[in-house]
């Protein structure tokens, strides 16, 4: 494994969401296309975030949000390009990102999951599209989501994009290693080159009574096994047991350049969180 670096950033999906919406560079993201590289024109972006919690090996429950915005550049994560094994220390913030857009692109966004047709309604306060009343939807392993943006005259155009939803993550046997031993993380693998796994080992660093504050954040090939080297576990091993947890997140993305200055992006995650007591 490459040497581990120490860097401060936001938690897993917050990193992805803010990178798309705010053009903030964080460890998981890369430039998405020539639209973002050297353009002096303002680009038009639609970002779709689908975040789910695994409920079994075959099912998950998720939420969906769409924002539309303009920017000279936006750095978009790519689950295929980021399939490399690396770890770094990051601060941890447990709050859910409040994704806010800038524009309206029609009355409602179509959201088809499998054979079901749902509607993401426009929230004028946050200027985003979401399921009514913070609702959720269930999906099965293998389902595909298709998002259809109706578009607005003179603004973001009508467009659509599909993504194979991130399959539920089922952890294998997870055992906290003895000091000096590596940490083996196991899960149900998916043989798909568009799937990336994010492993977040979380803990507190302030001694007894401290709150969760740091994570060892790793990206891994979705092959079912990742080993965190023993030399990276000192802070974890010395942390209060009550603060320790492990998150395993499967991430899959897709993007499409609608025209030379218009891009739509979708990211799908499914995670499982395990308390390490």
Image (cartoon, rainbow, N blue to C red):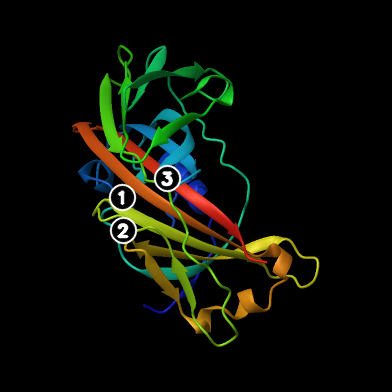
Distance from disc 3 to disc 2, alpha carbons, whole Å, reads 14 Å
Label 1 environment density (alpha carbons within 10 Å; few <14, some 14–19, many ≥20): many
Whether the residues at callouts 2 and 1 have beta carbons within 8 Å, the answer is yes
Image spot of residue 198 (x, y percent):
43, 58
The mark found on residue 40 in the picture is none
Q: Which of marks 1 and 3 is nearer the N terminus?
A: 1
The image's mark for residue 269 is: 3
How far across and down, in percent of the image, does residue 197 sit? 39, 57
Rounded to the nearest whole Å, what is the CA distance between mark 2 and mark 1?
A: 6 Å
Name the quadrant containing residue 103: top left
Between marks 1 and 3, how big is the CA–CA gap? 12 Å
Label disc, if present, on residue 82 of the rendered structure: 2
Residue at 64% across, 78% down: 237
Quadrant where the N terminus lies? bottom left
Q: Is mark 3 on a helix, strand or loop?
A: strand
Judging from the image, what secondary structure is the residue with disc 1 in?
Answer: loop
Q: Nearer the viewer, residue 272 or 19?
A: 272
| Mark closer to the chain start, 3 or 2 | 2
| Few, some or many residues within 10 Å of mark 2 (<14, 14–19, 20+) | many
Q: Mark 1 points at which residue?
A: 78
Q: Is residue 147 left or right of residue 271?
A: left
For disc 3, the neighbor class at 10 Å (few under 14, some 14 to 19, many from 20) is many
């Amino acid at each position: 494994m490459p040497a581990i670096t120490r860097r401060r950033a936001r938690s897993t999906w917050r990193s992805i969401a803010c990178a798309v919406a705010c053009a903030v560079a964080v460890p998981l993201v890369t430039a998405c296309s020539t639209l973002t590289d050297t353009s002096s024109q303002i680009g038009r972006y639609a970002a779709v975030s689908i975040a789910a919690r695994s409920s079994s090996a075959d099912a998950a429950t998720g939420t969906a949000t769409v924002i539309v915005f303009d920017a000279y550049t936006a750095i978009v994560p790519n689950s295929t390009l980021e399939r490399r094994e690396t770890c770094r220390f990051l601060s941890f913030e447990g709050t859910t990102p409040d994704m806010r857009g800038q524009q309206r692109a029609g009355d409602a966004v179509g959201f088809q999951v499998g054979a079901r047709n749902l509607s993401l309604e426009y929230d004028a306060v946050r200027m985003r599209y979401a399921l009514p009343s913070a609702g959720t939807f269930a999906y099965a392993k293998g389902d595909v989501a298709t998002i259809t943006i109706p578009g607005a005259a003179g603004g973001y155009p009508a467009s659509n994009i599909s993504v194979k939803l991130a399959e539920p993550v089922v952890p294998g046997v997870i055992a906290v290693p003895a000091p000096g031993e590596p940490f083996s993380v196991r899960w149900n693998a998916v043989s798909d080159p568009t799937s990336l796994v994010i492993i977040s080992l979380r803990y507190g660093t302030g001694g007894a009574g401290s709150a969760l504050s740091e994570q060892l954040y790793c990206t891994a090939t979705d092959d079912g096994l990742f080993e965190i080297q023993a030399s990276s576990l000192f802070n974890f091993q010395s942390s209060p047991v009550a603060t320790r947890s492990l998150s395993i997140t499967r991430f899959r993305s897709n993007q499409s350049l609608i025209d030379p200055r218009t891009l739509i992006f979708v990211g799908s995650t499914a995670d499982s969180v395990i308390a390490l007591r």
